[in-house]
Image: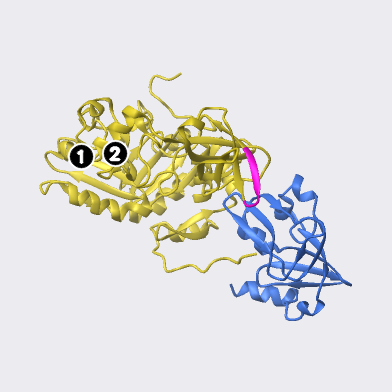
Amino acid sequence: MAGPSATDDVKTLPLDAWHRAQGARMVPFAGYAMPLQYEGIVAEHEWTRERAGLFDVSHMGQLVVTGEGAEEALEAILPADIAALKPGRVRYSLLLDDNGGIVDDLMVTNWSSDEAGECYGLVVNGATKHGDIAFLAERLPDHITLTHRVDRALLALQGPAAAQALERVLRGVNEDFYFMQARAWEFGMLDLEITRSGYTGEDGYEISVPAEHAETLAGRLCAELEVKPAGLGARDSLRLEAGLPLYGHDLSLDTDPVSAGLSFAISKRRRTEGGFSGADRVLSVLEKGAEKRLVGLELEGRLPAREGALLYAGDEEVGVVTSGGFSPTRGHPIAMGYVLAGHAGEGTALEAQVRNKRLPTRVTKLPFVKQNYHRKGAA
Amino acid sequence: MARYFTEEHEWIEVEGDDATIGITDFAQEQLGDIVFVEVPEEGADFAKGDEAAVVESVKAASDVYAPVSGVITEGNPALEEDPALVNSDPEGEGWFFKLTLADKSELEGLMDEDGYKEFVANL
């Protein structure tokens, strides 16, 4: 078989030594050495679904947009209703080019306060962050400041036991704290910025921490019995089960938000008023309906259909898989892919071409595994 | 019986003209959790270097190339039911396929166990 590939020169992140001490297998990802796994992808996946996994996502870009008028400036770019996003609230949004193609997906948090003034945090994908910064810098007016916070690490604590574990470390943190909310928190000398969010489908947090203290926090969290480190491998299988698209795979410049099933990210007011980048094209697709749609696919047996596998209805090629793998929770292969709208209905039988085989597959609703967020007002 | 190893992390157990082939413990550890193995069918004729099998881990699919030329006599049926055998017993029950060697001279130049250990230690 093909041997382990030589690693290119890659940069290290604040937790590099810590990961190696935990026995991580490090791989190059988004220009950095990142932990793929510690004890094993399936074990870390299952641990996160049952208890809590700690993921290092410091490769992602932590950006801040500040200055009077930041709200309007962001509304000229993002399709979200930034004016309605209160301080301490988080929203999923998109960077779109002028043709409505997806430049990146991101989380935007309103960190505005009397002291900070108008202040918005953006967390963007690691592989795209430098392009995103250039894209934003070109479009934001001169009086708005864009800062790339390279002095902070980002940890994601995810899983049904994340809340009780974090509560023991940061007493009181969970009081009136729900999915898609944010709060600043002091822990000894550490100033933490916490959002109740993540990308695994589980309840959990993303915690921004000064880089020089990242090891302390990671060690402190993993000292809790419920928490173990988890790597990029488990992060990918978890987000796929949760039906969450991944930039560079399910999302790209060639896909628009409507086809990608992300119409919810275009706020109601913005649909009427437009005014965000790519609005003309996106609103037109919203009205007419997309030609192709991102769907979930379930396969029988054990052979996964992976990114690039073509999808057929009889002899007709009707789509392509953009993410695929084996679902540890479901016990069979799952995938996401784009199919022509006429074949995107739930239950539609298709075939996936994997090497010389045609695998029977069925369009299914997303997510594959029920999301477990801690929502305000939910039982 | 003699066991040989390749730089591509296959092991080859040879008895007379018959060889059993699998991937090494080092290889399975690199791959991680294995969810599917596609083994060749009886009668398939491979030249050295042909794609002979596919191993799918949770994260990726990897081709396994025939390390020597020969005709397949058996693919391991147990892997269909339990691909994780490759993780738990890679150099035993988790073998991939057996073949009849076409050219025994191809074994020359392969590593023995000590040689392979040294090879892996230097990776």
Of badges 1 and 2, nearer the viewer stands 1
What residue is drawn where x is 52% and y is 54%?
A: A36
Q: Position of residue A93 (x, y in %)?
A: 31, 37
Q: Amino acid at mark 1?
A: Leu
- Please state the chain letter of the residue tagged with numbered disc 1 in the rendered image: A
Asked if the residues shown at circle 1 and circle 2 are in contact, with their CB atoms under 8 angstroms apart, the answer is yes
Give the position of the N terminus of chain B as an image quadrant.
bottom right
On whether residue A233 falls in the magenta region, the answer is no
On whether residue A359 falls in the magenta region, the answer is yes
Boundaries of the magenta span? A355-360
Q: Name the secondary structure under disc 2.
A: strand
Mark earlier in primary sequence (1, 2): 1
Q: Position of residue A324 (x, y in %)?
A: 54, 44
Left or right: A231 as drawn, with respect to B47: left
Q: Amino acid at mark 2?
A: Val
Q: Which mark is residue A74?
A: 1
Chain coloured yellow in the rendered structure: A
Q: Which residue is mark 2?
A: A108
Q: How is the image coloured?
A: by chain
Q: Position of residue B117 (x, y in %)?
A: 69, 73
Colour of the chain lettered B: blue
Q: Main secondary structure of the magenta part?
A: strand
